[in-house]
Image (cartoon, coloured by chain):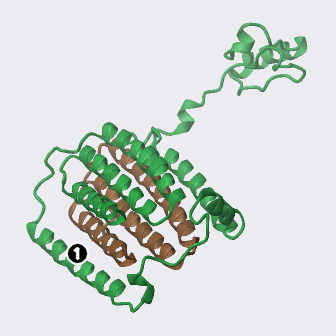
Chain colours: A brown, B green
Amino acid sequence: MAISWYLVVSALIFCIGAAGVLTRRNPLVILLCLELMLNAANLALIAFSRMHGNSDGQIFAIIVMVVAACEVTVGLGLIVAIYRRRLPIDVDQLRELQG
Amino acid sequence: MSAVIFFIAAIGAVAGAIGVIALRNPFYSVLALVGHLLSLAALFLLLRAEFVAAAQVVVYAGAVMVLYVFVVAYVGDGSQPVGRGGSGLRVAAALFVGALFVELAIAMLGSGLKAIGGDGAPYKAGFGQPAAIGQALLTKFLFPFEVASLLLLVAAVGAVVLARRRRGLTLGDEERDASRFVTARPRFTGTMAEAVGLVHAPQDQRENGAERSAGDGVEPPVPAPAGVRDDEHGGW
């Protein structure tokens, strides 16, 4: 398959993830949608790595996976802290920091 | 054959992504993301990224998703109604995302890259296999590798600090502070080692302590007297 097909799939997954971040209000689902976007970026990185025949892009994808794992860990810790304080798990109601 | 596998995996990946954002129950969203990640691993295999595909399945679809499932089970499924979202916002989001997709497609397909329509450049033997990845990580990309390990450590410590049960910060008992729980006690009352007689105070010190405790009541906690080998007695 041509590399462009992979890039189109990557763009589609990225846009679906962005739509989820924009529309869903449960922070758990928003974290899942961030995962979708990061994975779309990973797919593009690996497709370009294959296009050049150079494995540096795969290293980049692995580092992105590490960063995604860190983000998930801290995000889930925040969600657990929100739940412990009996606050609503809804990003529309958690607006104390909003200007 | 590879085209068939590509379309199956691509449809699976896109369907999983749509399932993540469309399902109401976050638990089903997590399961849809697992399916999405497995399909994506198949795409990685088609792109000759064997190690990344394996890491994707083991680390992402295994470990990270288990973490998600635990948090969803702890927090609750969140399916209680949280009020209706604005449908105007939803339409605006759909328009924005459609524009984003068109823009991305133009940016990538119209980039004029010659190789983008081909199957990829010829690659060396061992491309994307664990040996090549490991050698690159430990030689050319050693610094990002070490920074990534440090980042993982920071994230682990941060998650523990964020999610621990902290008494002073819950709503309603802000006035509770740690100093109220530190109480002074007389010498040689309290610890288990003193209670079972493993720690003996010297005779003069015990008398002085008794005099002083008769004088001013309580004493701050005392450390173990020197010469007590608590490793022999199993510690405190």
Quarter of the rendering containing residue B75: top left
Assign the C terminus of chain B to one quadrant of the image: top right
Of residues B36 and B154, the one nearer the viewer is B36
Q: Where residue B53 sits: x, y (%)?
A: 47, 56
| Residue B149 in view | yes
Residue ID at (26%, 78%) = B101
Assign the N terminus of chain B to one quadrant of the image: bottom left
Residue ID at (36%, 78%) = A4
Q: Where residue B98 sits: x, y (%)?
A: 20, 77
* Dot 1 crowding, Cα within 10 Å, few <14, some 14–19, many 20+: many
Residue ID at (57%, 54%) = B152
Of residues B158 and B38, the one nearer the viewer is B38
Q: Hey, what amino acid is under mark 1?
A: Val
Left or right of A70 in this view: A34? left
Q: Is residue A61 above or below residue B173?
A: below
User: Given the image, what chain letter belongs to the residue carrying mark 1?
Assistant: B
Query: Hey, which residue is sitting farthest bottom in the picture?
Result: B112
Of residues A57 and B50, the one nearer the viewer is B50
Query: Hey, which residue is sitting farthest top in the picture?
Result: B196
**Label 1: element kind:** helix
Which residue is denoted by mark 1 in the rendering?
B97
Quarter of the rendering containing residue A55: bottom right
Residue ID at (66%, 22%) = B185
Q: Where residue B158 sits: x, y (%)?
A: 52, 51
Q: Where residue B171 sits: x, y (%)?
A: 35, 43
| Residue B171 in view | no
Of residues A91 and B57, the one nearer the viewer is B57
Q: Is residue A47 above or below residue B218?
A: below
Tally of numbered tags: 1
Left or right of A6 in this view: B145? right
Q: Is residue A23 above or below residue A52?
A: above
